[in-house]
Amino acid sequence: MKERLRPLTEGLAYDLLGGTLYSLGYYTFATNGGFATGGVSGLALMTNYFTHLPMGALTVAMNLPIVLLTFRSLGKKFLLRSLRSLLIITLIMDGIMPHFPVYSGDPLLACLFTGLLVGAGMGLIYTQGSSTGGADFVVMAVRKARPYLSLGQITAVMDAVVILAGWPVYGSPDAVLYGLVFTFVSTFAMDYVVNGAAGGKMALVVTRSGAATARAISDEVGRGATLMPGKGSYTGRDMDVLLCACGKMEIARVRRIAHQMDPHAMVMICDAAEVVGEGFTLPEDAN
């Protein structure tokens, strides 16, 4: 029974938190903001501006044709996870958010907070191999075909088309400018959440005590390392090159160990936007 329920409950907490942030951004800050956001939610927002129909229901209705077009390319598992996320967002946006006041202040503050909340919410949902539906299905299909593009970059390009439509809808070029600010902020927030969850640090250590350093890192930090032979181009000395991927909170210990084992070691520390494999994020096919 637990195994049957696992696909339904896996990542549910992320969906609930991400859906709450997403709904809070759109309903509370964007409804009276007077600017256009991107994607299907942006289209729903503009439709709501004229019809006052529920945002969640409009989003679901606009999602249906996109689901039919992208179903085969994305697969059943991703589709089911996304439908669950979309259902949660719809229930929160139409069932809970109307009981709270809507922000009607400075449009710039509205678009900034919309971008932060929506971007963070989408990022949380994306980290679980799901999406918020609509244009996200298209985004993930493009990402599957072009994995070197970030989710934020693909979303930003697609959002631009919808944002430009906000000019005639709201009757002001400010709607476009605020929409661009929203896109920048949401892209940053989304990539930060996605890459922050899957990212880490990489230490590249050039040392004369490679094997001992690797053992010490394994014993004290619990991280493995790749040991490679090297040679100094100026001195001609044989050296060891140690490559170690670790968490952001572990990098200081790795650096300390490297210099304890060899005070003359050269330690280079780099940001790793994403670390996939044992001890880090599992590959998508393994989820």
Image (spheres, rainbow, N blue to C red):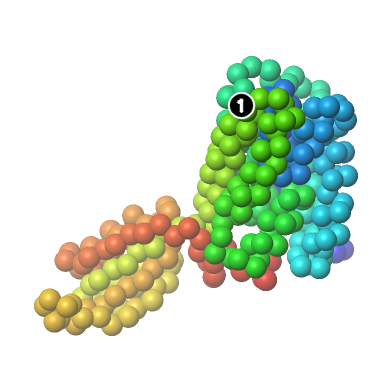
Which amino acid type is shown beneath numbered disc 1? Asp
Rendered residue at 66%/49% (across/down): 158
Q: Which quadrant of the figure has residue 237? A: bottom left
Q: Where is residue 145 in the image (x, y as percent from the top left)?
A: 65, 68
Rendered residue at 81%/23% (across/down): 99
Q: Where is residue 62 in the image (x, y as percent from the top left)?
A: 84, 45
Does any portion of residue 273 appear in the rendered image? Answer: yes
Task: Looking at the picture, tell me which residue is in the foreground, 189 or 212.
Answer: 189
**Residue bearing the label numbered 1:** 174
Query: Does dot 1 land on a helix, a strand or a loop?
Result: helix
Q: Position of residue 140 (x, y in %)?
A: 69, 59
Rendered residue at 38%/68% (across/down): 244
On the rendered image, what quadrant is the N terminus found in? bottom right
Above or below 157: residue 53? above
- The furthest residue to the left: 235
Q: Which quadrant of the figure has residue 75? A: bottom right
Above or below 222: residue 15? above
Task: Looking at the picture, tell me which residue is in the foreground, 49 or 82.
Answer: 49
Task: Looking at the picture, tell me which residue is in the foreground, 103 or 251.
Answer: 103
Does any portion of residue 221 appear in the rendered image? Answer: no
> What is the tally of numbered marks visible in this picture?
1
Above or below 201: residue 132? above
Q: Which quadrant of the figure has residue 285? A: bottom right
